[in-house]
Amino acid sequence: MNKLTSILGGFAVIAVAIVFIINFRPNANQPVVDRPSCAIEVRGNCITPLHYDTSYRLAVWGLDSERARQIPLRRIVAEGLIERWLLNEDAKRLGITVSDDDLNAELAAGRARLSMPLEAVEVTVSQGKGKTVQQKVQADDLFPYLRLDQDMIRPLDVKNRQTGKFDLKTYEKQVRMIGKMSPQDFRDYQKEELIAARMRDLVRSRVQVGEQEAFTSYAQDKSTATIGFIRLDKRFYADLVADTSKKAIDAWVALNKEEEERVWSSRKPQYTPECRVARHILAKVSAEAADQEAEKAKAQKKIDEAKARLDKGEDFAAVARALSEDGSAAVGGELGCVGKGKMVKPFEEAVFKAEEGKVSDVVETQFGLHLVKVDKIAKDADAEALGRAEVDKDLYLAHESERLAAESAKAILAAVRGGKTLEQALEAHMTELKAKATAGDGKDDKKGAKKDEKKADAKAAAKDDKGAGEKKDGEDAGTLTFDNHPQRPVVEASMPFNNTGTPIRDAAPGTNPAAIAFKLEKPGDVPDDIVPLFSGYAVMQLKEKKPASKEEWEKDRVAFLASYRAQKERDALSAYIARLKSTLGTEIQIHPEFRNEAARPADEAGDTEGL
């Protein structure tokens, strides 16, 4: 009986092969459409619209036409066909092909393949109302929406529903509905897809993964560390520590005249022929607030309070420090010498309509409600002198704050390396800064500023109080001090992180705080150098390092090995295809109809739901 079954089974396979080889003929009744002869040309070789359309339909099969149109697939399908061509060409070099029997077996099983690119593709995505943006899309991220598996196989209905066996008529119906091509054309199309699939499998099969290698990767992923760190922000040193006297700025400019002249030349149009030295008070209106009316009412109340205080004769700078919600509050609302084209339009109009020394009416912008005061109207030579002074100060502070932050970080690192805790090292540093500031204030008793050791920033308050005279109640409310500066250095602790974590945000390019931390051996260790940040520098110290345990590895081993191998296989295939693509250069041309979403033919997606 078993022998008879085997013989009959053999006849069945032979019969299927004969059906495919003899009966599948090109369809002579296909409609003629006025379209390009080639969808894609690669080194002069043509990938036809017929293959492109079939790949697209296989991708969206089972989706209604509207949903299909929402998925940006045109360029992805084109890149997939280019990848298929590359794999087929290299298969010829290696002598790899597929037999008729193998192809027959795939088709008889109802497995239709298509190629999707491995790497992300830049596509045009609609945002509605005719607006589009360019966006990188990973093809396999779309597979769940396309109901497509990771092997890029689309199941076809090729069986007789009564017998459950392969049925030629059912198969042909599916091919014509999906591919809009003859069975023989579909066979040729699928042969190229199957060869490409074999090439992918060949590349992946060469990947070898040792258990020790996998454990090393697992340990890197699962091992954690925590650090303590101090961030030394340049803004803190610019606001409170740097010597901003004219003498200090002039001395720096004298040594850096070439840079100063270059920057001034680029910024000069911002100040000339006229600029206005202005201050403002801002009552914010957040665009994200749920109740916009309540938010505006709150801002109106604050701006009314500011106006009332000004009407009573209080100094504008003092009220700005006390009430303004802008970053300029700490410097009495100072904005520098404002030229045209620098501020938002309503604010700029208010500045250039204001009378010198007078407070404007309330000005509304997208940021909230403002009161504006123009201290001086500067024109021509005066505007140039004020503008150059501002540029000089900006440049000086950029360099000086960088130097001060770096020196401070190195001093703290040296103290920690010498045995102090981060807390002790920072406390000593802050005490030194406050002592220097207090000593400096004693030498230069500007504008009668109070020497308040707790605030330790009479210098900063004085430089912001130009001509304010006797101080009034509330004037110091918004003054920045060593104790209230938003970027003041404090000791922070990271959350546990692995080797790919981000324990310190804003690390400068090429700096990896996580990698630095994992090189430290035991708690209390510090790196050899400070950590560069976009905003300054950081000093870090290892608090704890917790390696992955063997018990955890044994529990996760099987699943991790599978995912690790899959990633290594993907990396190998990606590198292989990248090498093949690197040989093409510019020898690829995709017709616009086959890469632009808006160019999709009306019947391309089709309504395939339920077919």
Image (tube, rainbow, N blue to C red):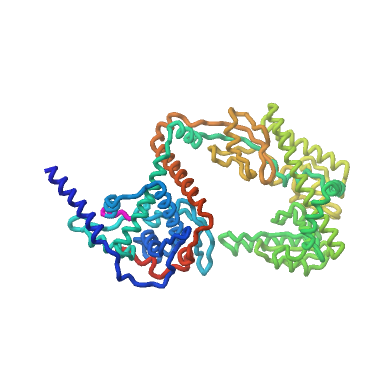
Q: Position of residue 466 (x, y in %)?
A: 84, 54
Q: Position of residue 607 (x, y in %)?
A: 35, 66
Q: Residue at x 76, y 46 (%)?
A: 399
Q: Residue at x 54, y 62 (%)?
A: 133
Looking at the image, which residue sits at the far left? 1
Q: Position of residue 310 (x, y in %)?
A: 78, 61
Task: Decide if residue 448 is in sight here.
Answer: no
Choose between 129 and 473: the one closer to the eye.
129
Q: Residue at x 37, y 47 (%)?
A: 96
Quadrant where the C terminus lies? bottom left
Examine the structure image and report whether residue 382 is included in the region drawn in magenta: no
Choose between 384 and 217: the one closer to the eye.
217
Instruction: Tell me which segment is drawn in magenta.
Output: 108-112
Drawn side of residue 380 relative to residue 557, left or right = right
Task: Decide if residue 297 is in sight here.
Answer: yes
Q: Position of residue 540 (x, y in %)?
A: 64, 35
All told, the count of numbered labels is 0
In this view, 415 is above or below 433:
above
Drawn side of residue 540 relative to residue 474, left or right = left
